[in-house]
Amino acid sequence: MQVFPSVLMVIAMMLVASPVVLAETVITSAAEVRSLSPEAAAAGLPVKIRGFAPFVHQAGIALFLHDGTAGIFVEQPFEGAVVWPVTGDRIEVTGITGQGFFAPVIRGADGKAPHIEVLGHDPLPEPRRVSGQELDRPDLDCDWIEVEALVREVLMNEGDIVLECQAGPCDFHALLEGPLPPESVPWDLAESRVRIRGVAATIFNTGRQMTRRFLRVNSLDDVVPLEPSDHQSEPRLVRADELFRFTGEGPDELVRVRGIATLAISGRGIFLRTDGGGLWVQTAQPVAAVPGSIVEAEGWPRVGPMKPILRARGARVIGTGEMPQPLKFEAREVLHARHQAEFVSLEAELLDVFRGEDGTTLELRDNATVFRGLLGEHDGTFPELAPGSRVRVNGIAQISSAGAFEPLQEEDKLLVRLRSPADVEVLSLPPWWTTQRVVMAAAAIIAGMLAIYARNRTKRRREHETQRREFEAVLSERGRFAREIHDSLAQGLTSISLQLECVRDEIVEEPDKARLHLENARGLVRDSMREARRTVWNLRPLALGEADLATALQRFAADLTREGKVATHQEIEGTPRPLPADHESALLRIGQEALTNAARHAGANRIVVRLRFGSDWVTLTVLDDGRGFDVAERVGKGYGLTGMHERVAALGGSLSIDSRPGEGTEVSATLPT
């Protein structure tokens, strides 16, 4: 008993996992295609379905198929198809499934049109009758239906007839695609109950969700009035201020109004001045009314935002009169419901002008009341208007409330709808001392003060910078003299001290050698004195004044190790050439320091001095086999090492010191030439 469901489950899984098995099965039912998930429909399963075409519109590339089980959309390529049926044809469609944008569809393979064969032609079958509740169901898409509805408005949109309808809780529109002539529009269907049949179509978003329902209707014969129009008795002529009073006409009473047109907006309606005040007559019907035309309209009263309106089923021009003069008010006086839709004139200050989707908007102020003037997009453009000007505007007052739910509504927003640029008259140009100019002048003064402050601050900064540079120059010169004294006199004294130590050690046992060391010391004293003079007079080092860099280094090494305890060796690579004086001086001082450190402190037995001349550089290297030291511990502690770094850095070169305890030392200085 428990094995059988498991076997069925395994078979079902095999069928799902095997596209080959599914691909061999041809779908023959529209309902079966619609039951597929978007992913399954996107697999392109083979389809062959027979049915009738409830709606066909070749220009709009729209074709629907209904086989009795359900309706479905037949997707065609943009270039169309070879065979196009007509509404009512019995057809057979062969193709594959597609996921569609809302519900699964039938399409052709490889981007081509599906194969369509016309089998015959019959009158359309009776549609499925639905209620307003059912009309809102998403799964009604593509079905052939009939519904009773109230036509709220009749519109014409680029040759198409559109009926704005309501069926129960569902608002929808019926679309009869054209091109159709304007005289074919059934304007008298407005505010009447009808029975409409057509194909249920869907407006949807990118998430495959329905956002609105509409019906695709084949012809006006598919829109049948349920209540025949009563043209035998003429509706009663009423005043605009009688509508929707406690004892006045309401939404179910057909009435007639008469007035002078103050503004006609094509496709939307007409503003009238009647004996009972201004009135907005809403109608999409084209009426050849211009300001001054005498217009008579009949229709049903409807509540408006601040005042009742008339939703007209018909309007016509019955004569020509004079354009009424605008009623002159202050802006705060216009903010009263009785002035809604009235032709008014106001004076105000122009604050700003800007363009938007609705047209050109003027931002205006009359005392403490700020309001706007609007010139429609197709009503012309204003000449240059300067903010701050005093202007007079004439137009239709449209008033709105703050939106609070109160029994007595308060009017707080005013829009004046202008008829043309001529409705704006400039009374006076803005005074020179406008708010903008005052702000600009104040900004200029502040900018000037900031500029003066910045200039003085820059001057003080330059003075401080000069003082700083002078101070740094003094410090640099002191450092230079310190290095010169250290590298000349201190090194000379070190050499003299070494010679005198030799005299002390050998004066008793080897007086001749002691005498030789004493003579060397005397010579070093003479050299040190000459070097001191030259340092004071800021001349080149004595050794370089007499010989080149290599000879001077060799001579210094010989004098330093004359007692024979340390062996020195010099190597030269490349082609020697004269160097700039500051380069030779720096390399000589670095070499002297390195030689002195190796002979005096490192206890070296052998020292190698190597000069390498490149095309645009020169490198001095001093290697010894002394006891070495930890470079990291000596950084910043010895004046000799610090002086080496400063000399090399001043000339844009590099210095490396490689030493480890017990492994000797290598000092290498490279300078660009």
Image (tube, rainbow, N blue to C red):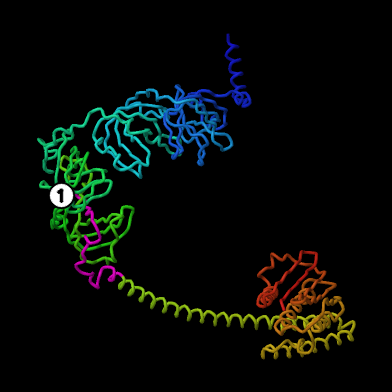
Q: Quadrant of residue 474?
A: bottom right
Q: Nearer the viewer, residue 493 or 592?
A: 592
Residue drawn at x 62%, y 22% as measured from the top left: 14
Amino acid beneath label 1: Gly
Q: Please say whether residue 392 is one of the residues in the magenta stretch.
A: no
Q: Please say whether residue 427 is one of the residues in the magenta stretch.
A: yes
Q: In this image, 425 relative to 580: left or right?
A: left
Q: Nearer the viewer, residue 373 or 606?
A: 373
Question: Percent x, y for residue 276?
Answer: 11, 46
Q: Quadrant of residue 12?
A: top right
Mark 1 neighbour class, 10 Å CA radius: few under 14, some 14 to 19, many 20 or more: few
Residue drawn at x 51%, y 79% as measured from the top left: 465
Q: Is residue 581 above or below residue 279?
A: below
Q: In this image, 619 relative to 311: left or right?
A: right
**Quarter the N terminus occupies:** top right
Question: Percent x, y for residue 380?
Answer: 29, 59
Q: In this image, 265 relative to 238: left or right?
A: right
Residue drawn at x 82%, y 87% as measured from the top left: 520
Q: Nearer the viewer, residue 583 or 334?
A: 334
Q: Nearer the viewer, residue 39 or 97?
A: 97
Q: Quadrant of residue 39?
A: top right
SS for dot 1: strand
Question: Percent x, y for residue 638?
Answer: 68, 72
Question: Percent x, y for residue 72?
Answer: 46, 29
Q: Which residue is mark 1?
A: 319
Span of residues in magenta: 411-439
Q: Is residue 171 above or below residue 415?
A: above
**Quarter the C terminus occupies:** bottom right
